[in-house]
Image (cartoon, rainbow, N blue to C red):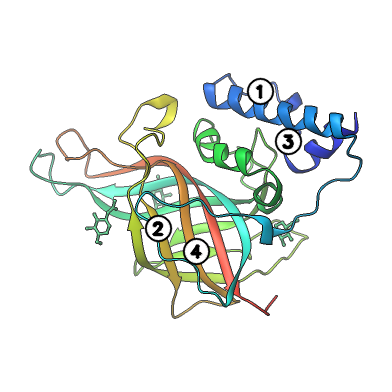
Amino acid sequence: MYGIIIVATYLTTALAAPTLSWSPALGEFYAAVDRHIQVARQEGTVNPPTCDLSKAVQPVAPTPLPAPDASWKLSEVIIGRGVQNYTCASASKNVKPVAVGAIASLYNVSCIAANYPDILSMLPALALQYSLPANPAANLEPSNLELVGHHYFTANGTPTFDLTTVPEPKNQDFGVAALKKNSNSTAPIDAPKGENGVGDGSVAWLKLDATFGSTGDIKAVYRINTAGGNPPTTCESSPAYFSVQYASEYWFYAQSGSS
Ligand SMILES: *[C@@H]1O[C@H](CO)[C@@H](O)[C@H](O)[C@H]1NC(C)=O
Ligand SMILES: *[C@@H]1O[C@H](CO)[C@@H](O)[C@H](O)[C@H]1NC(C)=O
Ligand SMILES: *[C@@H]1O[C@H](CO)[C@@H](O)[C@H](O)[C@H]1NC(C)=O
């Protein structure tokens, strides 16, 4: 009983989310939640674990990304769920889609990152299987993740993470990070191909550095454990403008010593 409460504190209220259709990702997620509940029961754990992000370990990319600076600390781990956008100059197999931005809703998974890394690593593939909630301010099913901001590109193409736009009356302000790409890695070969296992693969893992226009203390954001988002390799069957569904973990680092 305690176990269920503890795990539910940080993982899910979805043990009662009947609205979602079954998917392999959902099955894996429920199985992992159940394993944690059994462990908590056996250990007789009574208090929820703390959300100590110093315990979280960032997964290593197939081509390792540069490590965070020693003077930074991990400040947030967030799931992004949205679309990557592309243009095609013509519907030709000699033309490649060009990435023109992305838009995503951002959900706080810091406590999960600190305590349940196995579950964290499942969340992008799980999120990809389900649409964003009809109410844009609602939590993300099935793991009941809290909306804490938005990812978008500015008119001049700057990838931006806005952690201020949360529903009233919270009025949180964790800053707006304007970023530029530092380095990338292809996603692991077993990364999801797309929704229902169909698609063109998962977007690259990235290290993005804070640049001019950032507010707050964020120094870098890593895009990790991506799910979906890749375009077809050529424009042969693509319209001039299209969006591809994706989800990802985003690891935010701030200058140590700042809040
Ligand atoms: C991406 O496309 C979506 C529609 O699918 C649109 O709402 C969004 O504004 C676009 N964002 C960018 C940066 O192109
Ligand atoms: C995310 O959750 C953690 C733990 O509850 C909290 O400390 C942190 O401020 C939250 N971040 C945002 C952006 O809401
Ligand atoms: C990584 O970045 C380089 C340089 O911008 C680019 O040519 C390459 O396609 C990128 N790789 C991936 C997997 O996105």
Q: Residue at the location (22% across, 44% down)? A: 240
Task: Report if the beta carbon of the residue with label 2 is closer than 8 angstroms to ligand 3.
Answer: no
Front of the two marks 2 and 3: 2
Please state which of residues 123 and 58 is positioned toward the viewer in this rendering: 58
Q: Do the residues labelled 4 and 1 touch (CB within 8 Å)?
A: no
Where does the image place residue 126, in percent across and percent down from the top left?
Answer: 55, 33
Read off the residue under disc 3: 12
Where does the image place residue 111, in percent across and percent down from the top left?
Answer: 71, 51
Q: In which quarter of the image is residue 52?
A: bottom right
Front of the two marks 3 and 1: 3
Q: Which mark is residue 221?
A: 4
Q: Is residue 149 toward the left or the right of residue 240 in the image?
A: right
| Above-or-below relation of 17 to 176 | above
Task: Report if the beta carbon of the residue with label 3 is closer than 8 angstroms to ligand 2.
Answer: no
Q: How far apart are marks 3 and 4 (CA)?
A: 25 Å
Name which of mark 2 and mark 1 comes first in the sequence: 1
Q: Which mark is residue 97?
A: none
Q: What element carries label 2?
A: strand
Q: Distance between the residues labelled 2 and 4?
A: 8 Å
Name which of mark 2 and mark 3 comes first in the sequence: 3
Read off the residue under disc 1: 19
What amino acid is found at the position of numbered circle 4 in the picture? Val
Q: How far apart are marks 2 and 1 (CA)?
A: 34 Å
Read off the residue under disc 2: 206
